[in-house]
Image (tube, helix red, strand yellow):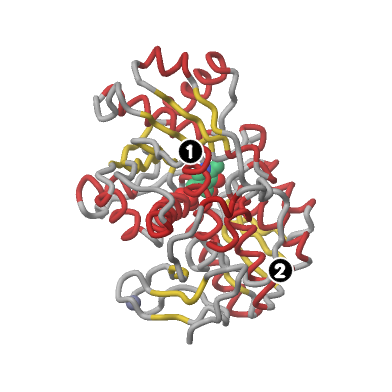
Amino acid sequence: METAVSSYSLATDLYCPACGKQYDADSIQTYATCCNQPLVTRYAISPLSKSMLNNRPLNMWRYHELLPVHQKQHIVSLGEGWTPVFPLPSLAARLGIKKILLKDESFNPTGSFKARGISAAISKAKELGITHCVMPTAGNAGGALSSYAAKAQINATVIMPRHTPETLKEECRLYGASLLLVDGLIDACGRKAKEICATTGAFDMSTLKEPYRLEGKKTLGYEIAEQLKWRLPDVIVYPTGGGTGLIGMWKAFKEMKELGWINGKLPRMIVVQSDHCAPMVQLFETGHLPAHFSPEPTIAYGLAVPHPFAKDMIQEIIRESSGTAIAISEEAITLATRELATEEGRLLSPEGSAAYAGLKKLIEKDYIREDETVLFFNTGSWYKYR
Ligand SMILES: Cc1ncc(COP(=O)(O)O)c(C=O)c1O
Ligand SMILES: [Zn+2]
């Protein structure tokens, strides 16, 4: 069943993270139906010299050996990745922390980190001959899908909650996607996506029900390591909805250990959610979701994922990294946006603002100590939430 490893990609096959069952990477795959888990891409990894990265283009495809596309001509790229990491020294001094770093993903095409996952998924879809993709989304992933599908000349159907801000809807239409609006949160959109795929034969690109968005998001981890000269921060704060970036970064860290690119202790991984919809925080604190769990929309639209498909993997990463999960109020998110805008001149998406609010709360609780380096993400552009 093993794919022939190409010089361009070392990907060999896929596996179920729960039971290890192997899945073929040369045919279209969805998720590990054996255990109802996301599928994980495996690579033929052996120690490699970091110098292979010298003189490569500054986008996420500089790590192409560790990405799933075997033929270069299938890559659909709009220049995603290699986003800036900004030190925030005056904020760090005020909060009494050694170093605070902001990785600003709003610099990506379509203004969010979703471009990474979608570039990988659409490229692989092209390689596998897929012609129509369907995606439920809180907004940003839908915009990215519409854009990359247009570039690849693949049909895209995007399904969003009706209450999503207008800009996030309009960009999909401009890129030529079909946009459907549904009452409710992303779960309701997911049910609609399933229905459409069953009747049309289109491919379902729901978060982690498709294996390769994870691989694109993984480049966050490679980039942080390379940009910080192969010394990872002590703590990483991630605004979590479906958890793809968190799982991706952790996978990258493990792979880089095997490649011999990093060593030592890995960062504590922090899940930040909105207290309007915080299933991972509930699971972390109590071990189960209470019967009265009633998620509501949040201004951090991307965090409103009531039932993350990869909840087991997210929980495992929090545990293994000695991380934690924390919920933030809507007011704290709004205040965080203002604080970073007025003190640092940086306007963050509500999700990025939530990450910053989480970071502050963890400093107050002494979970983050004064001699530590912390990195948090702005995952999207404030300008799209109008
Ligand atoms: C701006 C933004 N931040 C964070 C998230 C959550 O991302 P993930 O699904 O990787 O947890 C999303 C998802 O929609 C988003 O759009
Ligand atoms: Zn399994």
Instruction: Please tell me which residue is depicted at 37% across the width and 33% down the height of the picture.
Output: 328
Instruction: Please tell me which residue is depicted at 30% across the width and 23% down the height of the picture.
Output: 371
The dot on residue 214 is: none
Q: Looking at the image, how many numbered discs can be counted on the residues?
A: 2
Front residue of 256 and 194? 256
Front residue of 279 and 377? 377
Query: x, y percentage for residue 6?
Result: 60, 74
Picture quadrant of residue 73: bottom right
Instruction: Please tell me which residue is depicted at 31% across the width and 71% down the height of the picture.
Output: 18
Q: Is residue 126 above or below residue 97?
A: below
Q: Determine whether the residue tagged by mark 2 lies in a helix, strand or loop.
A: helix
Indicate the amino acid at tag 2.
His
Distance CA(mark 2)–CA(mark 1)? 30 Å
Q: Residues within 10 Å of mark 2 (few under 14, many from 20)?
A: some
> Which residue sits furthest left?
286
Q: Determine whether the residue tagged by mark 1 lies in a helix, strand or loop.
A: loop
Query: x, y percentage for residue 302?
Result: 51, 45
Query: x, y percentage for residue 235?
Result: 35, 36
Indicate the amino acid at tag 1.
Lys
The dot on residue 229 is: 1
Q: Is residue 158 above or below residue 357?
A: below
Query: x, y percentage for residue 10?
Result: 53, 69
